[in-house]
């Protein structure tokens, strides 16, 4: 089944308490794509500059990513982010953000992408997300991610978006910010009143909560002792989830429950390396093996 993602592709400079790496492949759409292609091919829409390496396009394509929608602006520069993680690896400081070509990106979906059955609007400007929806037709499932920045500066547009999507992903503090509620579950229910059929609250090392009008369940994070750096873990979680849904070709409650578990497992590999390097080292069999361990851990 066809799976479309629209978001950012970037080069990141990342510093942890023990190591620094520069020009690491990053961006919401890239992390999503590497995770989703364990389950389903991906149609990618993003923009890069003239500094984008051709071998990175080849890498994406080798993993099952259709890069027809990857726009290259040869006179511009690719989006770049520089960040430093603190000792606890939960908190980080953004040292520099260079939007570059991403700053005025207006996505143009290739004709073959416009009837994608499953659509993920990765974290980015709400204006961009709405422009994508204007170009899609008859999707079975549309899920969006957002963050505190867009809640602050594009609130009215975000409220408009929520009327047009099936699912929303955000973390607990963002859900509280959007709704003004202080309790996570109350905030999630308030988000449902704004339009989506379901909400996924990302809670980092504490897993995720799924809530709809009829269901609520918690998926814990898989415990890992090899935390290297967590950039892109949320996007990877979304990629695993949406990739599994696209593979199954349906989005009923049981499928989404299984999809969220897969998302948690793929994200647990993501944090074991810089950027996407760990995902490039594993196979679907590794994911399935860890999922089975996960089942045994949480069974009672």
Image (cartoon, rainbow, N blue to C red):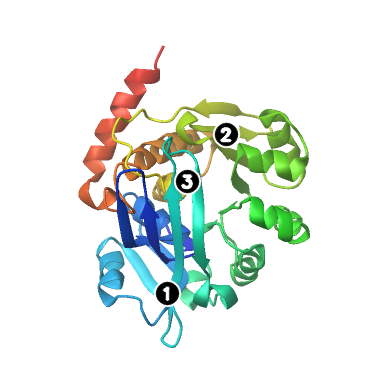
| Image position of 172 (left or right of 54) | right
* Residue 75, position as x, y percentages in the image: 44, 88
Instruction: Tell me the crowding category of disc 2: few under 14, some 14 to 19, or many 20 or more residues within 10 angstroms, Cα based.
Output: many
Specify whether residue 116 is in view: no
Relative depth, front residue between 266 and 103: 103
- Badge 3 or badge 2: first in the primary sequence: 2
Specify whether residue 122 is in view: yes
Relative depth, front residue between 135 and 145: 145
Say which of marks 3 and 2 sits in front. Answer: 3
Q: Is residue 140 above or below residue 136?
A: above
- Report helix, strand or loop for mark 1: strand
The quarter of the displayed image where residue 199 is located: top right
Instruction: Tell me the crowding category of disc 1: few under 14, some 14 to 19, or many 20 or more residues within 10 angstroms, Cα based.
Output: many
Alpha carbon separation for disc pair 3 and 2: 14 Å
Relative depth, front residue between 112 and 239: 239
- Badge 3 or badge 1: first in the primary sequence: 1
* Residue 173, position as x, y percentages in the image: 64, 39
Residue occupied by mark 2? 210
Residue 70: which numbered mark, if any? 1
- Report helix, strand or loop for mark 2: strand
| Image position of 208 (left or right of 174) | left
Alpha carbon separation for disc pair 1 and 2: 31 Å
* Residue at the (60%, 28%) spot, across then down: 216
Q: Is residue 139 above or below residue 38?
A: below
* Residue at the (62%, 29%) spot, across then down: 215
Residue 234: which numbered mark, if any? 3
- Report helix, strand or loop for mark 3: helix
* Residue 56, position as x, y percentages in the image: 29, 69
């Amino acid at each position: 089944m066809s799976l479309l993602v629209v978001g950012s592709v970037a080069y990141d400079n990342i510093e942890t308490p023990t190591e620094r790496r520069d020009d690491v492949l990053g961006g919401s759409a890239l992390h999503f794509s590497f995770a989703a292609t364990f389950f389903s091919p991906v149609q990618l829409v993003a923009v890069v500059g003239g500094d984008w390496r051709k071998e990175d396009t080849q890498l994406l394509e080798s993993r099952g990513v259709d890069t027809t929608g990857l726009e290259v602006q040869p006179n511009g520069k690719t989006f770049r982010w520089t960040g430093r993680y603190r000792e606890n690896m939960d908190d980080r400081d953004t040292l520099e953000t260079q939007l570059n070509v991403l700053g005025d990106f207006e996505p143009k979906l290739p004709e073959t992408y416009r009837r994608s059955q499953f659509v993920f609007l990765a974290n980015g400007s709400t204006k961009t997300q709405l422009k994508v929806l204007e170009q899609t037709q008859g999707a079975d499932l549309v899920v969006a991610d957002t963050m505190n920045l867009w809640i602050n500066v594009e609130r009215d547009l975000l409220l408009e978006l929520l009327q047009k999507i099936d699912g929303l992903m955000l973390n607990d503090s963002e859900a509280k910010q959007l709704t003004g509620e202080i309790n996570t579950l109350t905030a999630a229910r308030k988000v449902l009143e704004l339009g989506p059929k379901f909400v996924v609250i990302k809670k980092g090392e504490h897993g995720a909560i799924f809530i709809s009008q009829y269901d609520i369940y918690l998926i814990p994070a898989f415990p890992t002792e090899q935390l290297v750096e967590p950039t892109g873990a949320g996007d990877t979680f979304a990629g695993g989830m949406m990739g599994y849904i696209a593979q199954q070709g349906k989005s009923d409650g049981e499928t989404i429950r299984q999809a969220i578990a897969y998302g948690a497992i793929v994200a647990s590999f993501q944090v074991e390396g810089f950027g996407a390097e760990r995902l490039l080292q594993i196979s679907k069999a590794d994911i399935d093996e860890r999922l089975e361990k996960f089942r045994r851990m949480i069974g009672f």
